[in-house]
Amino acid sequence: MEKEAVTKELNLFLGYTCNNNCWFCSEMANREKPGKSTEDVKRELANARKNRVQRITFTGGEPTIRKDIVEIVSYAHELGFEEIFIITNGRMLFYKELARKLSDAGLTHILFSLHAPEARIHDYLTRSPGSFEQTVQGIRNAVGVGNAVGVGNIIVENNTVITRKNYKSLPKLAELLIKLGVDFYEFILVNPITINSYFRGRFEEFVPRISEIHKYVHRALDIGKEKNIWCTAEGIPFCYMQGYEKNATELYMAPQRSILGPGGRYVADVNKSRRECGKIKAETCSRCRYYLLCEGIWGHYAEHYGMAEFKPVAGRYLRSSDIARGGRHA
């Protein structure tokens, strides 16, 4: 019997400190802010469980550099969360013992961030020499732990930020991820808000046009489908996902998603915020069959590149129920 889909998710920021220095980090302005205490995190976890949150996602910054990360995961497990995620750059998982401890503590999913199939590109994007080798070994260690007898069934995933520096290598990266043994991989268009805010003069250096990247994304998705590995893409309007509609990440986002960061930062409805504040649609989008499904494109992208490359696709309006959807681990 297939497990019921998660409907309520909390992205819990533990702090902003990180051992990478990625060009596209959305928390760049917060790097020097202090993280939460163990007691603060446990209190927030208990409140989330009382509010019937099913999936807890630990993020940052880099969660795995905290000395109390195993204790935090264990406490989340004791509280009974159905899914416990860590989003990580993976470098600390280079140490296999940490992978084993996290699995034993009850971690159900670990989401790595490998951004290229070779060190030259990945280390440039992370601005951290040696990070490629450490992340790759971290994935190997997590996969090995997940397959071991006597420990939890940890699911290993990867998300890759699509930039102008790496989009042509996405198919090769897909092949590497499959070789490493991941259960799922995802490609996410770089958030242009970050580049526009911190590296305004380098926007076109990092943010590619959708019309440039979609064929490479499709091929990378095809590689996963050929090997029966579930994979998706996020941030790409549906007019560029024709034939790949069921591989759009947006179809699988929990209906109720919230963010809780340090210093009381709270976003109660992430999905609504994306649709109403972050994304926009062209006037012609209302004539597109994907109008009800598609969030549109990031506003900063449209400000820089315009909307001319997005053309409405003729046909009756489609709803999510019309898409023969797969599943994260189908």
Image (cartoon, rainbow, N blue to C red):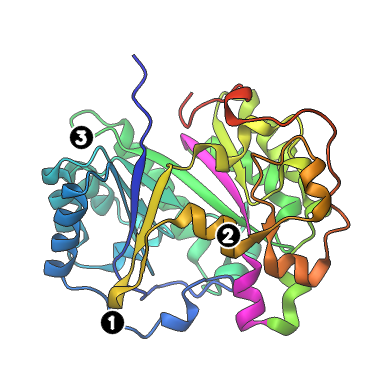
Amino acid at dot 3: Val
**194 within the magenta span:** yes
The magenta region covers 181-199
Please provide percent x and percent y for residue 249: 56, 42
Q: Secondary structure at mark 3?
A: loop
- Going by the numbered disc 1, the residue's amino acid type is Pro
Mark 2 touching mark 1, by CB under 8 A? no
Within 10 angstroms of label 3, few (less than 14), some, or many (20 or more) residues?
some
Residue at the spot of label 1: 34
Asked whether residue 289 is drawn in magenta, I would say no
Of pointers 2 and 1, the one earlier in the residue sequence: 1
In this view, 225 is above or below 205: above
Residue 309 pos. (x, y %): 87, 54
Q: Which residue is mark 2?
A: 276
Q: Is the N terminus in the top left, top right, bottom left or bottom right quadrant?
A: top left
Answer yes or no: do the residues labelled 3 and 2 have beta carbons within 8 Å? no
Along the viewing direction, whichever of 144 and 19 lies nearer the viewer? 19
Q: Residue furthest top?
A: 1
2 or 1: mark nearer the eye: 2
Residue linked to disc 3: 151
**Cα–Cα gap, marks 3 and 2:** 43 Å
